[in-house]
Every structure is written in C-alpha cells, then in structure tokens.
Amino acid sequence: MDDDNRIDDMPQAEDTEQQGSGRIYQTRYDDFMYEPIGFGEPEIPEPPQPPEKEKHRSGYGAAITLFFVFLLVSIIAAVAAIVFDVFNSKKAIEKIASQNVVLYSESKPEGANDIVNKVDEDGRYTPEGAAASVIDSIVEIYTYTDSSKDKLSSTGSGIVLSKDGYIVTNAHVLLENGCHVVKTNDGQTLEAKIVGRDIKTDIAVIKVSNAKTLYPATLGDSDETIVGEQVLAIGNPAGLSSTVTDGIVSYVNRPIRSNSTGFEMECIQTNAQISPGNSGGALVDMFGHVIGITSSKYVSSDLEGLGFAITINEAKPIIDELIDKGYVQGRFRVGIELIGMSNSTEIAAIEGELGYSLPEDFKGIYIGNISEDADIASTDLQIGDFITAINGKSVSSYSEFYDTVSSMYDAGDTVPATCAHVAKDGSITYYDIEFKLMEDTSGNY
C-alpha cells in the first residue's frame, strides 16, 4: 500500500485548523490519546478548603470577644457616671435648695370664726361654738400642801358660778388645810378659799377675790338631756389648760357610786374623755349649757370610753347648801373609815392590813380608822375590828352600811351594832356596841 492508503485506513481524529501567516496547519492526534500531543494548558488543582466546622468555631469566638468588649466598656462608662455624680451631688443639692418652693395656703372666709356664725336659729351651737361659749368659764385649780406653795398636791378644774367669785369643783381636788390657786382662761392668777366641801358627793365650792373679770357659766336642766345628743367635756387634764373633748350622752340619770366613798349620785354617762385633770370641769351640751360636773372619781378605770358627770340638777342643791352653810344639812356622821368585803380586791386589802387570812364565810365592814371626836370612839370598837350588823341587819359593804343606817336613823339618834374581832388563828369574838350619830358638817363620812 502506498502512503495515501495507509493514512486513510488509520482511525481518524478531528483535525484542527490553525491559521498563521496565511498557512493552514493540520494537527494529528495520537491513536491512543484523547488530547492532542504537545498542545493545551496543564490542569492546576484547586487549593484545599477548610472544613465547615472550623469556620463555625471561628465565628463563635469572635462573637464572645465582642460581647466581653462591650460589657467592659459598659462597666467603665457606669463607674465613670457614678464618680461624676458623687463629685457633683453637692452642687446639684445646692442648686435644688436654692430654688423657690411655692406653698399654697388659704385663709378661712371672713367671719368664719365668729361665734354668731356657729349657732342655728334654734340656738344650737356647732361644737366649736359651744366650746367658745363656755371655755372662759372654766378655770384651773392648783392645790398646794401649805401657803409656801413649795409642794403641789393636785390639779383640777372648776366652773365659774358667779361674777363675785364662786366656783364649783370636785372635793377631791382640794385639801382641807391646803392652799389653793385659781388660774382663769384669760391669764389671771387668784388665791381661793374653801367655802364648803362635801366628800360624800365629791362636790365643793371655793371663792376667789379681786378678779378683774369672771365669766359665769350658764347651768342647764339635766333632766332635758337625752341619750345620743352631742356633748363636750371641758377641763385641764394633766395641766393642759382649756382642753376640749367630745362625745355623746350614753345614758342619763344613771345611779353611780363614787369609787372612793361609795356614795351614790345620779350621773350622765358619756364617752367623752374624762381624765383626772378634768375633775371639777364641765359637761356641756350644744346649747352651751353646763349639764354635768365631770369627776374622775365616777370614772370606770377598767373600761375605756366610759365616764360619768354628776348631773347639774343633782349638784345644785348641794352647791346651794355649801354656799349658804358650808355643809349639807341632814347628813349624819359616824366617825369611821371602813373597807367593805363586797369583792376579792377589798378582801385582799383587808387581809393585807391584818397580815393573815379571814375565814371564808365571814362577812362585815373592816374599821380602818376611828375619829377621836366621834361618839363611836368611846365604845369597845377597835381599829382592825369589824361591824357585822346594824340593829340585827347584816352589812358587808359601804352601801349596805350607809343605806341601813340612813333608812332607820337620823343625826342625834343612837344606833345598836354587832361587832367582831377576828384572831390570827381564825377564831371570831363577837360583841355589841351602841353609838350616837353626829350631824355631819364636814362632808366626811
């Protein structure tokens, strides 16, 4: 075969024509190659890529770093702000203090405090009107042990009765041989003398002289008082002059016994505050009338909001007799001091005096003292003994003794009594006496 034939018989690959300088070249492929021999660019492999996991870790770490940088910057900024405030706080406070603060205030309408505007067409006052109408009639009373006035014994209140100086108060505010000074609401200081003093009812009258001006109170009719009406108590508790408390009438004409003498008086019960310094002060209604004389001796010490005032109608006859005679007529005097046995407190007090216990079934009134000028002092009765019966009727309390004697006898009469001496071993010796009742001109029992 010629050359042409050999060429045609061989497997042919695609011929590539290349042009250059006007010539045409024909490229022959190797029989066993897919690429032309001696031609083309070599294949360059791509660089290896980092795994996806490594990329993720790198981004997380950058975020944490950024967070801590932000946190540190915030802390530094906060500390700087605090330091700045501390160094500038004084200036800030001075700046605030230098600013003018506006306070809003307003006066009452013209004439709002005039007493004429505190009363209605029926003559009923408002509480402030009733207080204003009476307060100048209430005085302070200071009791000293003697004329040197070195030792103050007690303080209390009083109600002016007349322009010429008569004042009613409580008997327990005064001392029989003490020195008494009155101070009025307008500042006058006046010496006072006892006109009459009745311990039984706890009512007394004193008189002052040389007063420039006195304002007598208007006394009302306590029988017209009704439950629920508003009242004021005016006095000087704890030396706080012209103190006014308010309340209502809780009960009217309630019979109450004094916790010091046991004598019974008709009282107005009220929840208006009545303290020891109020003694001798006034219980006032809304018409500006005094309807009662307040007394701490008629106040329950066990219950709050429970006070009593002697009704003015009960007090008037006693006041009149004290002014007229210096004492209450028709009263008798035995001349003893006694303790009853009506409750466990009294019994404990008696046993404390004796120094030993009493028999359980024994009853009577214990004799704590006997006046030397009394007729009973001439009998066999001794201090520390008991009176157990009056004319055969058993007595074991002040009220039983007083009621029994007063229901059977008058001043000047002779009274039969059964007495007893209780020994330390519990034995009882009974004996009888008779004593004469004296007319009471002292107000003492």
Image: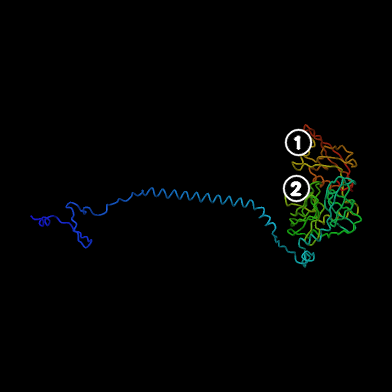
Q: Residue at x 81, y 40 (%)?
A: 366
Tell which residue pokes out farthest to the front in this image. Answer: 21
Assign a secondary structure to mark 1: loop
Q: Quadrant of residue 185?
A: bottom right
Assign a secondary structure to mark 2: loop
Tag of residue 301: 2
| Quadrant of the image containing the N terminus | bottom left
Taking depth in this image into account, of 361 and 327 the one nearest to the observer is: 327
Tell which residue pokes out farthest to the top in this image. Answer: 425
Taking depth in this image into account, of 380 and 199 the one nearest to the observer is: 199
Tell which residue pokes out farthest to the bottom in this image. Answer: 121
Up the image or down, 323 lies above or below 432; here it is below
Where residue 26 sits in the image (x, y, percent)?
Answer: 18, 58
Where residue 445 sits in the image (x, y, percent)?
Answer: 85, 45
Where residue 54 sits in the image (x, y, percent)?
Answer: 38, 48
Q: CA distance from mark 1 to mark 2?
A: 30 Å
Q: Which residue is mark 1?
A: 359
Q: Amino acid at mark 2?
A: Ser
Where residue 70 sits in the image (x, y, percent)?
Answer: 51, 51
Taking depth in this image into account, of 53 and 32 the one nearest to the observer is: 32
Q: Quadrant of residue 400?
A: top right
Q: Mark 2 or mark 1, which is nearer the start of the sequence? A: 2
Up the image or down, 344 lies above or below 214; here it is above
Report the side of 91 relative to 334 (left or right).
left
Say few, some or many: other residues with alpha carbon within 10 Å of mark 1 (under 14 / 14 to 19 / 20 or more): some
Q: Amino acid at mark 1?
A: Pro
